[in-house]
Image (cartoon, rainbow, N blue to C red):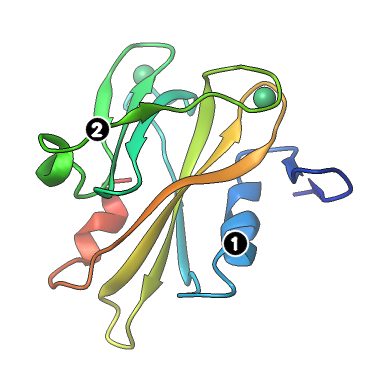
Amino acid sequence: MAIDKSGKWWVGSQPEDLKEYLEAYSSGGYKTHEFRLAKCKCGRDEFFFFADDDEGCAKRICSFCGEAHFVCDSQEWWTNSNPEEWKCAECGSKSANIGVGFSVYEDGEIRWLYVGERCASCGILGCFAGWKVAYSPSKQLMDQV
Ligand SMILES: [Zn+2]
Ligand SMILES: [Zn+2]
């Protein structure tokens, strides 16, 4: 894993770099303890990405097979949300790798989650949305990235 931090944006050479990025991103707030990379049922890891950071929800659509998936508990909040489509600020690509960082309580339940993305074409790393969880049981959300 290698992140190039020399420019305006952090650039990750591979999808797994999102883990380190989200750890750094969250270091001033609820730190992440767990990380999961999103993978489609078809095995690919590049998605079109829609999210509403105010409402706290995100949806990914596989750029290969078109399968849509709500990230973690997003479906619950989706109806009243106003999602924006993610687009790379640098190269304009709409295809990204997606990973979720979880900040957990001592008992392992989730306090907060961060949805990060890495541009599949130029590698720029970012965090398009994040929201509070703070209910239990919530550990199952780690399998719903
Ligand atoms: Zn797919
Ligand atoms: Zn890009």
Residue 143, percent across and down? 28, 51
Q: Residue at x 50, y 74 (%)?
A: 31
Residue farthest along the bottom direction in this orientation: 106
Give the secondary structure at mark 1.
helix
Amino acid bearing label 2: Asn
Q: Position of residue 39 (x, y in %)?
A: 41, 34
Against 123, is 94 above or below? above
Q: Which mark is residue 64?
A: none
In front here: 60 or 92? 92
Q: Residue furthest right?
A: 6
Per the image, the residue denoted by label 2 is: 82
Secondary structure category for the residue under label 2: loop
- The answer to which of 52 and 25 lies nearer the viewer is 52
Outermost residue toward the top in this view: 65
* Residue 66 screen position, x and y as percent: 32, 12
User: Which residue is located at x 35 percent, y 11 percent?
Assistant: 65
Q: Quadrant of the C terminus?
A: top left
Quick one: 17 or 80, which is closer to the camera? 80
In the picture provided, is 61 more to the left or to the right than 89? left
Q: Which residue sits at x=30%, y=73%?
A: 111
Residue 25: image tag: 1
Q: Residue at x 19, y 66 (%)?
A: 138
Find residue 125 and report its horizontal and vertical position in percent. 64, 42
Real-space CA distance between mark 2 and mark 1, rounded to the nearest whole angstrom: 24 Å
Which quarter of the frame holds ligand 2? Answer: top right
- Front tag of 2 and 1: 2
- The crowding category of the residue bearing disc 2, from other C-alpha atoms within 10 Å (few below 14, some 14 to 19, many at least 20), is few
- Disc 1 residue crowd, few under 14, some 14–19, many 20+, Cα 10 Å: some
Tell me the amino acid under the disc marked 1.
Tyr
Mark toward the start of the polypeptide (2 vs 1): 1
State left or right for residue 19 relative to residue 85.
Answer: right
Height in image: 105 above or below 145? below
